[in-house]
Amino acid sequence: SGGDYKQSDASSALHEQEIIERAVDYSIEIAREQGRQCNLVFAQSIEDADLIADMYTHKGWPTEAVHSKRADRDEVLKAYKRGDLWGVTNKDILTTGFNNPLIDMMTVLRVTRSPGLWVQMVGRTTRPVWLSGYDISTREGRWQSILASHKQNALVLDFVGNTERLGPINYPRIPGKRRKGKGDAPVRTCHQCEPPTFHHTSVKVCPECGYEWPAGTSIGDSASNAELVTASNPLGLPEIKRDPKEFGVFSVHQLIANEHTGKEGKRNTMRVDYRCGHRRFSQWVCIEHDKGSFPRKKAEEWWDEHGGQLPVPDSIDEALDRVDELQPPKFVKVWINTKYPQIEATDFRGHRFEPITDLNTPQELHEPEPDPMEREIEQSRKAAEHAAQFSGGGYFDDDIPF
């Protein structure tokens, strides 16, 4: 109704547990391969939303359903935004007015023939993770912030053919008024065939492979590979050129750890400065984030990797008291041709990084000569070796992309 599919017909086709489970399994496989951290699922009905959430959770991917029958949906969405849940399923609750920039994967099991609804659904994945320290009022600043974040793209797994039916979201097919005359016949796609075959919608069984479509609509057990965002640039927009990353390898002379106060009510983090001759590079760690959240898990992984004893500290004060448990790196690999240089990797043994010579400033690749102040630093090197660096990849407070 209202220009869309009849909900009862579409849901009856979707509510074949075996079909849905194959789609869930496929999405889990892709998420595991690509390291997707936050999944949003659109379901055809409330019953489907509950079923899909249970499937994900039972397979080890914590997911909850939100719909009109749940009184606690606000609490569920708060947990989702905190990173306590890997996924959320919904039935037309989160098409508009919902913003979670962490969403880097969408699983579509909701059939529609409405271009407007389709664009709204996919739009939930397009929110970038803006990192502090970048001028996002400029195009270049926005690009640099996105490139520095953990979310540089989002994956949409369309199991119901919306992409093929409605076209790319930046150039959707807007249906015109129905009129008499010749036109393209309606078709359905058989994804069981390789390559896919196309048939009139009246066909119930694929004449090529024998696949029988469920009543109501066609649901695949693998995602569509149709173009979600067109690369043909139909609007003639200017291309944005990005310079390739350039790296430098620096010898670490000292690590200084301090507490960093969160801005605008955000949580405090641990800031660690790497002293590399006359230069300094910084990282942050979310040691006080909620247990089970993605930032906290990354901090725990870092603590274990760097030789810290269990249990992992629960507070920054405790972490500062226990820095003598940790081993600092010998070298850091830094992305240098960006406004705010970023530490990309660390080397604790002294032979992890290959020599880098293709830079305009090759002198930065070698250990700089210490000035008189560095002699004092060198004298306290043994004590400094007990300081810690903390996991990063991004920059400030809750904006750190882990």
Image (cartoon, rainbow, N blue to C red):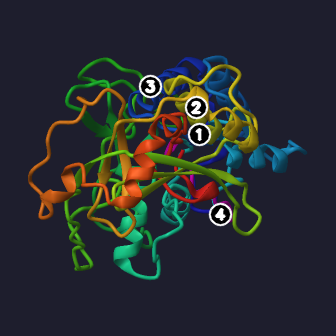
Q: Which mark is residue 14?
A: 2
Q: Is residue 43 visible?
A: no
Q: Which mark is residue 96?
A: 4
Q: CA distance from mark 2 to mark 4?
A: 23 Å
Indicate the amino acid at tag 3. Answer: Tyr
Indicate the amino acid at tag 1. Answer: Ala
Q: CA distance from mark 2 to mark 3?
A: 16 Å
Q: Alpha-carbon neighbours of circle 1 within 10 Å: few (<14), some, or many (≥20)?
A: many
Residue 266, given in percent of the width and then of the height, sits at: 72, 60
Which residue has dot 3 on it? Answer: 26
Residue at 38% in and 49% down: 343
SS category of the residue bearing label 1? helix
Q: Are marks 2 and 1 in contact (CB under 8 Å)?
A: yes
Whichever of labels 1 and 3 marks the residue nearer the N terminus, that label is: 1
In the image, the segment drawn in magenta is 97-107
Q: Which mark is residue 278?
A: none
Q: Which mark is residue 10?
A: 1
Q: Which of 319 and 367 lies nearest the eye of the viewer?
A: 367
